[in-house]
Amino acid sequence: MLEYLLRLLILLPLVGGMAWGSLWLWKRVQMGGPLAGARQERPIEMVGVLPLGPGTKLAVVEFAGQRILLSVSRGQVTRLADNSQGDFHVG
């Protein structure tokens, strides 16, 4: 019984740490971020995302010095507004 408890005390944190690490790595890969922590210069940068429901969200991206509001769903991406036309203000 003591051997079982010792194995449990050792393996449970190990498995939990592996699960946390794999979720962290998956999130970094999904976002396209660098794994080493070095910041890459990109032409497009994600400013913010607001989930609206299952499979839909609003996103603000910065491209060529201007911010663009996008509607993102499972099947399409639609430009709603950009700040060059004075449609919205981000402060």
Image (cartoon, helix red, strand yellow):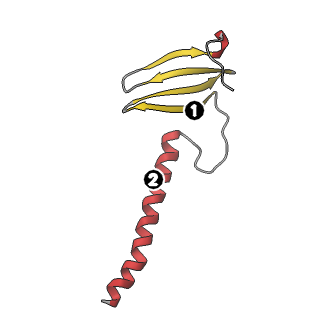
Which residue type carries mark 1? Gly
Residue at point 66%, 24% (across, down) = 90
Question: Which residue shows up at 55% across the image and 21% down it?
Answer: 69
**Residue that sits furthest to the left in the current view:** 1
Can you give x and y, in whole percent of width and height, for residue 76 in the image? 40, 21
- The residue under label 2 is 23
To which residue does mark 1 refer?
48
Image check: 79 left or right of 73? right
Number of residues whose C-alpha sits closer than 10 Å to that of mark 1, classed few (under 14), some (14–19) or many (20 or more): few
Q: Residue at x 52, y 46 (%)?
A: 28
Q: Residues within 10 Å of mark 2 (few under 14, many from 20)?
A: few
Q: Indicate left or right for 30 with 90 as reference.
A: left
86 versus 63 height, above or below: above
Point out residue 50 in the picture as x, y percentages from the top left corner.
50, 32
Q: Position of residue 1 (x, y in %)?
A: 30, 89
Mark with earlier residue (2, 1): 2
Instruction: Please state which of residues 32 and 3 is positioned toward the viewer in this rendering.
Output: 3
Give the amino acid type for the residue marked by disc 2 in the picture: Leu
Image position of 22 with respect to 51: above or below? below
Closer to the camera, 34 or 84?
Answer: 84
